[in-house]
Amino acid sequence: MELLPEGSQMIATEVASPFLAPFKLTLVVAVFIAIPFVLHQAWAFIAPGLYDNEKALAIPILVSSIALFYGGAAFAYYVVFPLLFEFFTQTGPENVAVMTDINQYLNFVLKLFFAFGVAFEIPIATFLLILSGATTVESLSKKRPYILLGCFVIGMLLTPPDVISQSLLAIPMYLLYEVGLLFGRLVRKRKEEKEAAEEQEAEL
């Protein structure tokens, strides 16, 4: 509302929007806040079937996934939304009144929250691919141009049809992909050092 032109206000173009939009927002916020508890319950269900070394790795991944999802949502709220709303409200014709529909606005915001929250999980996905042996750091490094192009394609599909929001999603996605590669290298190096130490102990 602060970024709307002076004197502007939101409108409801549907009969039930004044009731359903706040109700929908409350439901989504409740789920959003409850995500750590939901993931903890999922973890409690699968933990008994894991080995000790798998448990030791799964807990940091679980905590990191929650933090990254919230980090993506915070990035969207504090960085992306102000830029987008200021751009949209200032680039229109002067004789067009900006009167945002409350339901359309909520759908727009929730879509971007979800898109950025999921996109910020890229380091975890990259790390798990390397850890599981499905791919290697070298292979992913060679595919950087394709990954960069894929980030912009995903940004185009998940955000409104404008280059600003697409770039604001694609660029962090690519940087997070590089973070995933960095952690993949560190884990691989530690694994190689551990195997080398075990071999030396076996020889002794």
Image (cartoon, grey):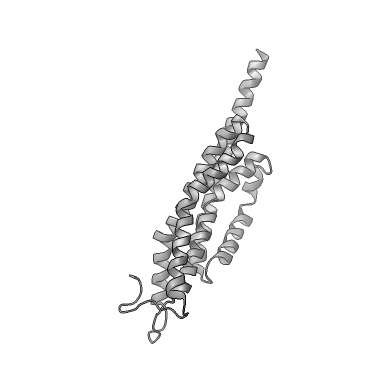
Q: Position of residue 170 (x, y in %)?
A: 53, 59
Residue 150 appears in which quarter of the rendering?
A: bottom right
Query: Please, is residue 200 above or below residue 72 in the view?
Result: above
Q: Nearer the viewer, residue 97 or 187?
A: 97
Q: Which residue sits furthest bottom?
A: 95
Give the side of residue 125 with respect to residue 162, left or right.
Answer: right
Looking at the rendered structure, the number of numbered marks drawn on it comes to 0
Q: Which residue sits furthest top?
A: 204
Q: Position of residue 107 (x, y in %)?
A: 49, 69
Q: Position of residue 17 (x, y in %)?
A: 46, 75
Give the side of residue 9 with respect to residue 109, left or right.
Answer: left
Q: Is any part of residue 97 visible from this angle?
A: yes
At a point 39% along the width and 80% down the height, the residue shown is: 98
At a point 46% along the width and 71% down the height, the residue shown is: 20
Q: Nearer the viewer, residue 145 or 9?
A: 9
At a point 49% along the width and 64% down the height, the residue shown is: 110
Residue 87 appears in which quarter of the rendering?
A: bottom left
Q: Is any part of residue 168 visible from this angle?
A: no
